[in-house]
Image: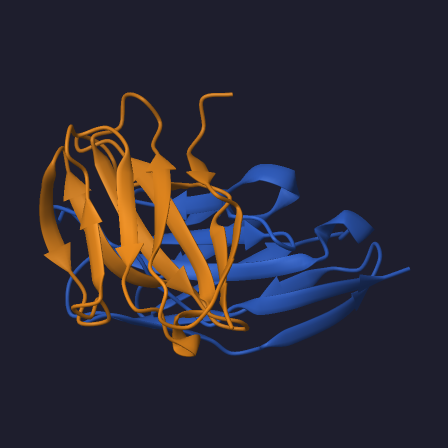
């Protein structure tokens, strides 16, 4: 079984400051890792994903994440946030190479960007 | 727009009533997933289809819940005898079966059971 823990439920940050959202996962098999963003009353939008290869993954809107297999982490970073980055962010994992690839999500981190 | 669509976007019902939601996936995607998201939580997997076959169901999917995808295109999720605990956002996602690691989500249907 897989599980995902997002260590921070809320992260307040000032505009143009950097932000890091932490994601720890556990799995007994190889995994694919994802970060999704959810704006109020909307569905999930994919920010970035790690399937294989380079452990540093770049996504949309200036976000990047680093896969650390030994520490089982997939932290999300942005060097300079904007007001429009205010949203909820979800880390998710699926079993690599498995049929179905259902996603297991963390509890989410709410980012509030302050002017 | 060829993204995943869901209808209705909002549904208010009284306890004990039946409700049905519809999901239209991205046209070339043959996998379709249903998730449930309660307030302040991450989405939880309910079930998924490959074409018309329902291949996995979560233990969260009680016998009051039924999902279908009769022609391998759109899917419906029905909840019978709704309970207040069914209030949640119901999300649909789709992906390809080959190279289909990424799921694309619809806007969701928000259900409120009074």
Classify residue A74 as left or right of residue A84.
left
Residue A95 in sight here? no
The colour of chain A is blue
Residue B81 in sight here? yes
Residue B60 higher or lower than A61, as above or below: below
- The quarter of the picture where residue A24 lies is bottom left
Looking at the picture, tell me which residue is in the foreground, B106 or B19.
Answer: B19
Residue at the spot 15% in from the left edge and 70% down from the top edge: A28
Looking at the picture, tell me which residue is in the foreground, A39 or A20.
Answer: A39
Q: Residue furthest right?
A: A115
Expressed as whole percent of the image width and height from the top left, the position of residue B17 reads 37, 64
Residue at the spot 57% in from the left edge and 53% down from the top edge: A38
Residue at the spot 9% in from the left edge and 49% down from the top edge: B55
Classify residue A65 as left or right of residue B18.
right
Expressed as whole percent of the image width and height from the top left, the position of residue A96 reads 19, 51
Residue at the spot 44% in from the left edge and 39% down from the top edge: B6
Expressed as whole percent of the image width and height from the top left, the position of residue A23 reads 46, 69
Number of callouts = 0
């Amino acid at each position: 079984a897989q599980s995902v823990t997002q260590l921070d439920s809320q992260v307040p940050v000032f505009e143009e400051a950097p932000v890091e959202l932490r994601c720890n996962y556990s799995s007994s098999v190889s995994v694919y890792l994802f970060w999704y963003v959810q704006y109020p009353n909307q569905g999930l939008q994919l920010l970035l994903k790690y399937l294989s290869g380079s452990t540093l993954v770049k996504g949309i809107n200036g976000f990047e994440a680093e896969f650390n297999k030994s520490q089982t982490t997939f932290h999300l970073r942005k060097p300079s946030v904007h007001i429009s980055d205010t949203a909820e962010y979800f880390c998710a994992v699926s079993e690599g190479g498995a049929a179905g690839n259902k996603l297991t999500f963390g509890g989410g981190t709410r980012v509030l960007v302050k002017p | 727009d060829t993204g995943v669509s869901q209808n209705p976007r909002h549904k208010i019902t009284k306890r004990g009533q039946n409700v049905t939601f519809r999901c239209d996936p991205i046209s070339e995607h043959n996998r379709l997933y249903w998730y449930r998201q309660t307030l302040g939580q991450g989405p939880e997997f309910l079930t998924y289809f490959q074409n018309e076959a329902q291949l996995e169901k979560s233990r969260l999917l009680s016998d009051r819940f039924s999902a279908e995808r009769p022609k391998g295109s759109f899917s419906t999720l029905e909840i019978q005898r709704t309970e207040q605990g069914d209030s949640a956002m119901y999300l649909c996602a789709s992906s390809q079966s080959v190279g289909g690691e990424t799921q694309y989500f619809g806007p969701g249907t928000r259900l409120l059971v009074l």
